[in-house]
């Protein structure tokens, strides 16, 4: 693990837990309708972010202004990838979208923690997260056509002298990692030069890690995680505290003022560490590829110190300048490694259309 911080279910059980969580999601009255496709701005990477309760839009890659942007949609599971090409910088990015709070379909994908077998090229079998793998199978054909080109690869393929990056946060990071696995395992004509995941949960057992190590692929992977990110160490042996914490944060997102007035009840006391036991049936791919950055909040970590499931969800979010991944990236040395976007704290101070959500 590279630290750039400032200072610091097997078989039947998996099947049962997955089914119970999916039923809980299905019956949750707090979840809204399916999230619609996001708006894509012209040639710039504009995104919606927050500073505390204030919401606005900002350009997170101001040094590039010639993006060709498209959406690859799979509406059945509400899985989407936003794809970018910059001719000037010879750069192509496939950004898999993470879990949307309002999307019951996304929660179904996350909650399906049954493990299903996949045979790797070396003949070994890895047990993978069923929800992630099933969702990937829906969107991956669209991604492969975009990467390899349409109509026998003659049109719009990513050129061989460009850099191709797969990336994503949370569910999106899991999909990016598994998509890269498929690209290398299936010998795609065009494979990613880099895979960058933010807050990626564990997606399989150790056999997948072993294969990545054997194929010398770990140098292509960077897993960026905030310290205390609850999702980074999932799945747990018992998922109830995690699901409850996510539900509480959802309530705060849709009604922040109500959340503040009830903060004592919502955040609650720290759980018994035994209730947050990390399952040893899952493993991260390429542990040496992990970069830890500061989240600014207490949460859940592998040492089970300063436990706060609610804080663990806040540490996982990627849309607020005051905590989670935006704060963490801008307060670590990662920005010094950016050769393309011109990423800096100005993305938070240059927000436009600022107001309460």
Image (cartoon, rainbow, N blue to C red):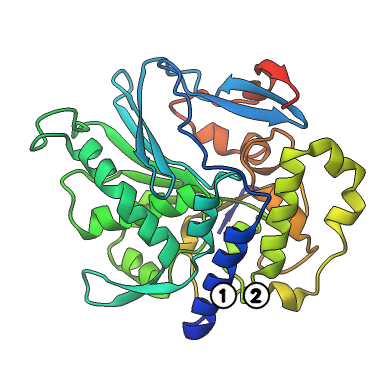
Q: Quadrant of the C terminus?
A: top right
3D distance between C-alphas at marks 1 and 2: 8 Å
Q: Tell me if residue 8 can be seen.
A: no
Q: Is residue 293 left or right of residue 192?
A: right
Q: Quadrant of residue 156?
A: top left
Judge by depth and name the residue closer to the eye, 354 or 102: 102
Q: Quadrant of residue 302?
A: bottom right
Q: Quadrant of the N terminus?
A: bottom right
Residue at 31% over, 55% down: 137
| Spot occupied by residue 172 in the image (x, y as percentages of width and height) | 46, 47
Contact check, label 1 and label 2, Cβ < 8 Å: yes
Q: Tell me if residue 72 can be seen.
A: yes
| Spot occupied by residue 186 in the image (x, y as percentages of width and height) | 19, 58
Furthest-bottom residue in view?
A: 12
Considering the numbered disc 1 on the image, is that residue within a helix, a strand or a loop? Answer: helix
The residue tagged 1 is: 17
The residue tagged 2 is: 238
Judge by depth and name the residue closer to the eye, 299 or 25: 25
Q: Nearer the viewer, mark 1 or mark 2?
A: 1
Residue 39 drawn above or below residue 142: above
| Spot occupied by residue 105 in the image (x, y as percentages of width and height) | 49, 51
User: Dot 1 surroundings within 10 Å: few (below 14), some, or many (20 or more)?
Assistant: many
């Amino acid at each position: 693990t590279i630290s750039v911080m400032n200072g610091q279910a097997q078989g039947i059980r998996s099947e049962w837990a997955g089914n119970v969580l999916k039923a809980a999601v299905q019956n949750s009255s707090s979840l809204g309708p399916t999230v619609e496709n996001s708006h894509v701005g012209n040639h710039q990477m504009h995104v919606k972010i927050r500073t505390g309760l204030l919401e606005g839009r900002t350009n997170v890659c101001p040094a590039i202004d010639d993006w060709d942007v498209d959406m690859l949609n799979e509406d059945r599971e509400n899985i989407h990838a936003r794809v970018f090409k910059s001719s000037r910088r010879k750069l192509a990015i496939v950004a898999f979208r993470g879990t949307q709070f309002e999307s019951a379909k996304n929660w179904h994908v996350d909650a399906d923690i049954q493990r299903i077998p996949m045979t790797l090229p070396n003949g070994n079998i890895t047990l993978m997260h069923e929800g992630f793998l099933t969702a990937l199978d829906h969107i991956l054909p669209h991604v492969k056509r975009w990467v390899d080109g349409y109509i026998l690869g003659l049109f719009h393929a990513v050129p061989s002298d460009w850099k191709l990056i797969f990336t994503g946060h949370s569910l999106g990071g899991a999909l990016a990692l598994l998509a890269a696995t498929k690209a290398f395992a299936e010998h795609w004509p065009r494979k990613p030069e880099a895979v960058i995941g933010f807050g990626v949960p564990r997606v399989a057992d150790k056999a997948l890690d072993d294969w990545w190590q054997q194929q010398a692929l770990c140098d292509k992977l960077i897993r960026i995680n905030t310290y205390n990110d609850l999702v980074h160490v999932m799945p747990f042996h018992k998922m109830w505290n995690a699901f409850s914490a996510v539900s509480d944060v959802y309530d705060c997102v849709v009604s922040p003022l109500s959340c503040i007035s009830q903060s004592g009840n919502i955040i609650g006391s720290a759980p018994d560490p035994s209730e947050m036991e990390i399952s040893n049936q899952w493993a991260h791919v390429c542990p040496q590829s992990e970069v830890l950055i500061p989240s600014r909040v207490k949460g859940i970590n592998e040492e089970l110190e300063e436990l706060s499931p609610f804080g663990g969800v806040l540490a996982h979010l990627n849309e607020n300048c005051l905590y989670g991944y935006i704060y963490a990236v801008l307060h670590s040395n990662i920005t010094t490694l950016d050769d393309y976007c011109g990423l800096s704290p100005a993305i938070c101070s240059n927000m436009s259309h600022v107001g309460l959500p």
